[in-house]
Amino acid sequence: MVTLTDRAAMHAWSREQRKRGKRIGFIPTMGALHAGHLHLVKQSLAQTDCTVVSIFVNPSQFGPKEDFDRYPRVLEADREMLAQAGCHALFHPDVTAVYPEGFQTTVAVEPLGSDLCGRERPGHFQGVATVVSVLLNLVQPDRAFFGLKDYQQFVIIRRLVHDLSMDVEIIGVPTVRETDGLAMSSRNRYLTDEDRRRAVAIHGAMVAAKTAFEAGEKGAARLEAIARRILIDAGIHRIQYLAVRSADTLMPVKVITAQSVVLTAVKVGTTRLIDNVLLT
Amino acid sequence: MVTLTDRAAMHAWSREQRKRGKRIGFIPTMGALHAGHLHLVKQSLAQTDCTVVSIFVNPSQFGPKEDFDRYPRVLEADREMLAQAGCHALFHPDVTAVYPEGFQTTVAVEPLGSDLCGRERPGHFQGVATVVSVLLNLVQPDRAFFGLKDYQQFVIIRRLVHDLSMDVEIIGVPTVRETDGLAMSSRNRYLTDEDRRRAVAIHGAMVAAKTAFEAGEKGAARLEAIARRILIDAGIHRIQYLAVRSADTLMPVKVITAQSVVLTAVKVGTTRLIDNVLLT
């Protein structure tokens, strides 16, 4: 596995692969890799000829009071995991390689980016949309893989790529979970033992909504109430949002008639966690 | 010359050219073509293997009180000119081909985009940056050609492409002028005979500043005063801005020590005209 750190090297590597007729798969990450990331790598390895993973803790997607400074950085462990997984290239740029001197371009997807997580994290999705635009242009993949755990991010990136007519296919990959159902996340390592036990209720709430839906409940407010009850019963009171939305556009729905998604963001201790479930 | 009108056809055409190893040149326009546009086509023909011109009057770069409705649309004349010039493809999309249903992505280059023309035309450069991003992704040219008459636009596009690491070279082409010096513009056809005579002073003002600079004047305020005098003496009183700036960043300069540019925007009758001159 080759490690690339600057724009020119990344561009040259991709150009070389394309010239050889290789299809490039790409997984942008912030490092602190877990089984969820490795599942994305596996998908990419299966669907393309060579796989690039980027590791870049992007400052512009963190708010001033968020966890940028304490976000886990474990490059050597990450590199080892990627090499063992059969990844072909690690792109690990420093800040100036992503944001050159004088950088002043912003990509925004609005109103999608100000809803749900965007309400709690103003500017977050502008940061995401901008850095993903830069990374996609640098790596020029045929396919880019995103975990569906960050469902709103997935919808925004898919929208962005379609709107700007970028020549890349965006693939959403189902969430990988711990054995008790908690969605894998780099932020899970912040949880105390007590928080960790409590956090299981997040997936539990999603499953309860899905079960009710499959049993015939089509009212969004009713499904939200069922899921919310599970969270509160588990002692999770700081529910930033819990909403049933269109799976395609994330627009609110009252009665479910097309594919929908239940999404939630909660605080457990000091840690913000998100999860979702598709209602098909 | 082939005419393409939708995204898929444009993408396919470009993909085919690249597959054959052809270098693509691209000139985005709003139509109403004049000798300035044809000069861009000529540059592209000389520097690349095949040339695409787009004609799209982009609604999102016009303000609510601006001339979107009356902007000249003369497709058949334009097509004839391009075919005669040896252009290979005309891309003439309708609005939904550029902005598909649900479109909500914006590309902004700030603060560059709110300065100078951006002050008078809020949102204009966001509209330009967004549509140019879409068009560059659709056409995927090796080089894109922009007239230096729209100097701020050129700087913004160059910045955008660098910031987002788009794989295209942005070429600025010197302004083509009428024999009396007036910069070619699709909007010149709005001018009454009286306005047209008066408008010559715009280039006159730029030349006066350049002449004073070459004679040793390095003070920005002095050069601005010299140019402004020429405009006012010609009866052009509505000067939206007249400024000496860094040619690279468009930042204000007091004393000229590096390549600079004098830029102006004025109203002559009901018509807004811009021009500039480089001080090298």
Image (spheres, coloured by chain):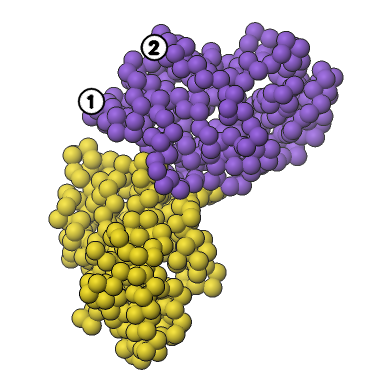
Chain colours: A purple, B yellow
**Amino acid at circle 2:** Ala
User: What is the tally of numbered marks visible in this picture?
Assistant: 2
**Which corner quadrant of the image does residue B94 belong to?**
bottom left
Residue A143 appears anywhere in the view: no
Task: Farthest residue to the left: give it.
Answer: B46
Residue at the image position 45 percent from the left and 48 percent from the top: A104
Q: Quadrant of the N terminus of chain A?
A: top left
The x, y position of residue A163, in whole percent, is 47, 45
Which residue is the site of mark 1?
A: A20
**In the rendering, which numbered label is found on residue A173?**
none
Front residue (pair B186, B161): B161
Give the residue drawn at x 69%, y 38%.
Answer: A120
Between the C-alphas of marks 1 and 2, the distance is 22 Å
**Quadrant of residue B232 in the image?**
bottom left
- Residue A242 to residue B9: above or below: above
Q: Is residue B43 left or right of residue A253?
A: left
* Secondary structure at numbered mark 2: helix
The mark nearer the N terminus, 1 or 2, is 1
Q: Residue under label 2, please give it.
A: A83
Q: Where's residue B176, x and y in %? A: 23, 71
Q: Residue at x 58, y 19 (%)?
A: A186
Do the dots labelled 1 and 2 sit on one chain?
yes
